[in-house]
Image: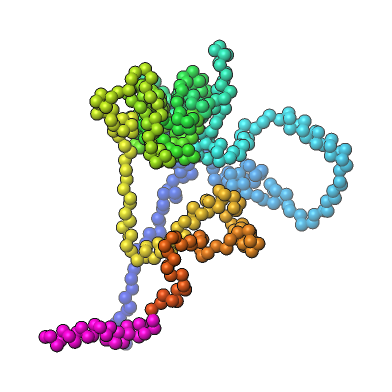
Amino acid sequence: MLLKFLSFRLPSLTFIPSRSNTVNFFQRRNEDVLWRTVTNITKYGARKGRGKTRQPYRRLSDYYKIGTLKSSPMRIRYPGLNERIPNSFTEPIYFEEQTEEERDASFKVNKVELAKKPPKATRKLLKEKLSAWERGFSGGQWLGQKLGPPPENLEAGVNFDDFQCICFQVNRVCAMKPGVGRDYAIRSAVFIGNGKGIGGFAFTRAPVFQSNKAVANAIKIASRKLFYIERFEDRTIYQDFFGEYRSTRVFAQRREPGYGVIAHPRIRKICELLGIKDLYVRTEGSTTNYIGIVYAFVTGLIHQESHKQCADRTRLHVVELNPNRMFFPKIVASPVNAPVKLDEEVTPIERMRLEDFYGEGRFPQHYGKYILSYRNHIGHLNAEWKRHPYRNMEKRIIRFLADGEVNRWTRRERKKWSDRQHEMVTNGQKPLPLGIGLPDWIPMEGEDDVFLGSLTDLMPPTDFYDDQNNGDAGFDSSQKELEKELNVSN
């Protein structure tokens, strides 16, 4: 029995070492030491004012105080101790309607009490909703909005009632001064004009957080520095010009009547204040330096010449070549103080184009058409083919809305328009269109023999397809005879 018992093997067991006296950081330190890690601050931090942002020291027992709700940071509610016991039974409440005299008396009392209360400093100002033409450059900002006429100059007796002011920029700038360091200030740029060629521009500085003062000072200075711009037909410039200020380049080109002003937002506001209606201006380089943009554009406007000034300077005729007159030359201005130069007296530089002369030989950078890398992909070609029938849809929508055919581009309005067109055609007020928007076809002289039959008459005979499907049966007999003759000759 003993030998048998000794021969018996015990199963293998795995022992995992463990500690029963493990103590973490929070169990090793007491409450005061733990709070010191959150609330303690160095002397350097105290000088910087960081002590105000530290948490206050609170004992653990404070979190479970039974009293008012504000006595404990956790604000625990104990019904019957710091909160009344909820009652399931609620007594019915009866309301008695007031008379008109009592209601009026209560309204008067409330008005008197509200008048006595001082207005709240945090009350939001009611913003007036403006149209798209009256809004500023971005959102609800007042930059770009018309600020009204400048104040009157009582000393000089000048009135600016027909002028308007627009603020272009308000930003913070700084300058390094000895003993002070960075000296911050507010800079504002303002442009004024009367819409008849007279304008002024100025920018001033004011102390920090006084942007209104900076704008007011700029308006006063701009009203004292006025200049006059001559306009061609009171709508555009006399000739294309080039203007430059630091890294900003401006290319201005005059346009035909009704073109409008297509330019930088700041330049559009300048054209509105000066009365320029048809112009295209391309801005290159820095487009965020608004003061540079204004300097470059205004410099080009001031240095442009009228047709009379150009004729007196060059002693040559100023000629207009209008495509509406088949480019037949028309003399616009002639020299007055001196005779016209002969052909031998004209120098090579005077034979230059006006655009090259006033543009100093510079032209805006031309970017070629961007070539898509996937232009020959089958998916792109299929998408282009699907969009092809609707290529003129956007222009058609604009034309419909501009002509007043429909008030809004909705299905209901388009259905009304189609019903009106159908009614006009059925009543004989409008001819029936021949096809999809195609006009009537009128043959010209000598085209009487033009085919006017149906399309089925132009189809090939039925045996043509049979010959194509039968292989050799489709060859012409003359071709077979020619092959036979060649074989015989060989």
- For this rendering, which residue is in front, 145 or 388? 388
User: As drawn, which residue projects farthest toward the left?
Assistant: 490
Residue 205 visible in the picture: no
The residue most toward the top is 155
Is residue 208 a member of the stretch shown in magenta? no
Q: Nearer the viewer, residue 124 or 31?
A: 124
Relative to 84, is 40 on the left or the right?
Answer: left
Using the image, determine if residue 303 lies above or below residue 381. above
Which residue is located at x 17 percent, y 85 percent?
Answer: 485
Q: Looking at the rendering, in which quadrant would you find the N terminus?
A: bottom left
Residue 425: x percent and y percent? 62, 62
Q: How is the image coloured?
A: rainbow
Magenta segment boundaries in residue numbering? 461-490
22 or 113, which is in the foreground?
113
Residue nearest the viewer, comparing 350 with 378: 350
> What residue is at 55 percent from the left and 62 percent from the top?
433
The residue lying at 46 percent from left, 62 percent from top is: 443
* Residue depicted at x 32% and y 85%: 467
Q: Quadrant of residue 20?
A: bottom left
Residue 388 appears at what percent x and percent y?
Answer: 43, 61
Magenta stretch secondary structure, dominant: helix
| Quadrant placement of the C terminus | bottom left
Q: Visible in this render: residue 377?
A: yes
Residue 470 belongs to the span the image colors magenta: yes
Please provide percent x and percent y for residue 88: 76, 57
Number of numbered callouts drawn: 0
In the image, residue 275 sits, relative to residue 159, either above or below, namely below
Q: Position of residue 371 (x, y in %)?
A: 31, 54
